[in-house]
Image (cartoon, helix red, strand yellow):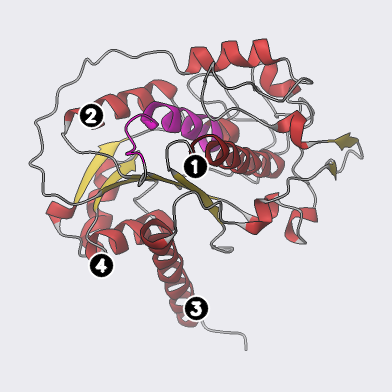
């Protein structure tokens, strides 16, 4: 003690591989309709805010959000300004014209999985494991094409086992563009792994996405929320799967109690345009990240509730552990 840099590197590589294999197991073996991750099973009914000392109550009904706009489903959220939220959801999910063309890809019969943020970290390890060991065709949804190419080569991925496609989650138009292009390559989407996320712990002021949203919530939650909406009809009934990568720091366990604590409040910040924080209070970068992960869990629960039985979709969330 202390361990050498080489020992630490080897340990982290082994841990990332283990996490990637865990993702594969969730995609390949979990039964339909299962909502995994116990740490997200009960969202906090009361939590303490950041160092400012404010107290906020946060009940299930007050933070629940729709996974998609479905007029046939009656939402049980009387305390939210639902008309405002529905207008914003409708604006986010507006149709986008098919204005790009890609050559049709020859079908090989492999199941297809989309992995966001697949050029590094857990996303890359999962993509490589799914392609090299499980026989999936992986859509590597990334911001940097060249980075993904280099990463795939380093992982010895067969060029026929993956497709690299541009997806910038900081732009909702990029999400729509990605879905349009995806439908033109001729592959049925069997699974979606919502892995990509951003966190800027040193920031004093919020960064904004192209659409003007605080970047952690805009990228980690809103963009994946839209992606799930747009692909919902593409996932096959009975076998379609959606997986969110979560974090223990956003739940009610020990890690979740370390300040700043996640707290969605009554979504005042989101209703006001999502410029700072979801609860509308002062910006704190780590809280913004935790809040975005709570939103992932809420969407996972709601999607599983709505489509687990009616369409046979498996919607899960998993926490792979802390990774530097």
Q: For mark 4, what is the residue?
A: 133
Q: For mark 1, what is the residue?
A: 308
Membership of 62 in magenta stretch: no
Q: Are marks 2 and 3 in contact (CB under 8 Å)?
A: no
**Label 1 or label 4, whichever comes before in sequence order:** 4
Image coords of residue 262 (percent x, y): 74, 43
| Residue range (magenta) | 219-237
Look at 76% across and 25% down and name the residue there.
280
Residues 141 and 232: in front is: 232
Q: Are marks 2 and 4 in contact (CB under 8 Å)?
A: no
Q: Secondary structure at mark 2?
A: helix
Image coords of residue 133 (percent x, y): 25, 67
Vertical comparison of 153 with 277: above or below: below
Q: For mark 2, what is the residue?
A: 183
**Label 1 or label 2, whichever comes before in sequence order:** 2
Residues 74 and 102: in front is: 74
Q: Mark 3, residues whose alpha carbon is within 10 Å: few (<14), some, or many (≥20)?
A: few
């Amino acid at each position: 003690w202390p361990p050498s840099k080489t020992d630490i590197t080897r340990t982290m590589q082994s841990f990332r591989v283990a996490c990637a294999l865990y993702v594969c197991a969730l995609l390949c073996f979990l039964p339909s309709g299962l909502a995994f991750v116990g740490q997200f099973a009960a969202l906090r009914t009361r939590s303490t805010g950041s160092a400012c000392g404010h107290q906020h109550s946060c009940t299930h009904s007050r933070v629940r959000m729709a996974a998609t706009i479905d007029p046939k489903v009656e939402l049980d959220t009387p305390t939210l300004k639902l008309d405002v939220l529905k207008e914003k959801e409708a604006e986010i999910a507006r149709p986008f014209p098919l204005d790009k063309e890609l050559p049709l890809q020859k079908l090989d019969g492999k199941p297809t999985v989309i992995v966001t943020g697949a050029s590094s970290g857990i996303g890359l390890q999962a993509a490589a494991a799914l392609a090299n060991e499980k026989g999936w065709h992986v859509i590597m949804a990334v911001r940097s094409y060249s980075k993904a190419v280099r990463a795939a080569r380093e992982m010895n991925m067969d060029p026929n086992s993956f497709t690299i496609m541009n997806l910038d989650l900081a732009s909702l138009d990029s999400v729509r563009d990605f879905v349009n292009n995806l439908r033109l390559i001729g592959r049925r989407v069997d699974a979606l792994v919502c892995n990509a996320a951003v966190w800027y712990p040193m920031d004093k002021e919020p960064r904004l996405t192209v659409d003007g949203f605080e970047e952690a919530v805009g990228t980690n939650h809103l963009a994946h929320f839209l992606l799930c909406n747009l692909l919902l009809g593409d996932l096959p009934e009975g076998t379609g799967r959606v997986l969110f990568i979560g974090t223990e720091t956003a739940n009610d366990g020990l890690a979740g109690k370390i300040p700043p604590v996640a707290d969605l409040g009554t979504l005042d910040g989101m209703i006001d345009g999502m410029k700072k924080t979801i609860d509308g209070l002062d910006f704190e970068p780590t809280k913004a990240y935790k809040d975005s992960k709570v939103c992932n869990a809420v969407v996972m629960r709601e999607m599983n509730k709505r489509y687990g039985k009616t369409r046979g979709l498996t919607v899960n969330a998993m926490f792979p552990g802390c990774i530097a």
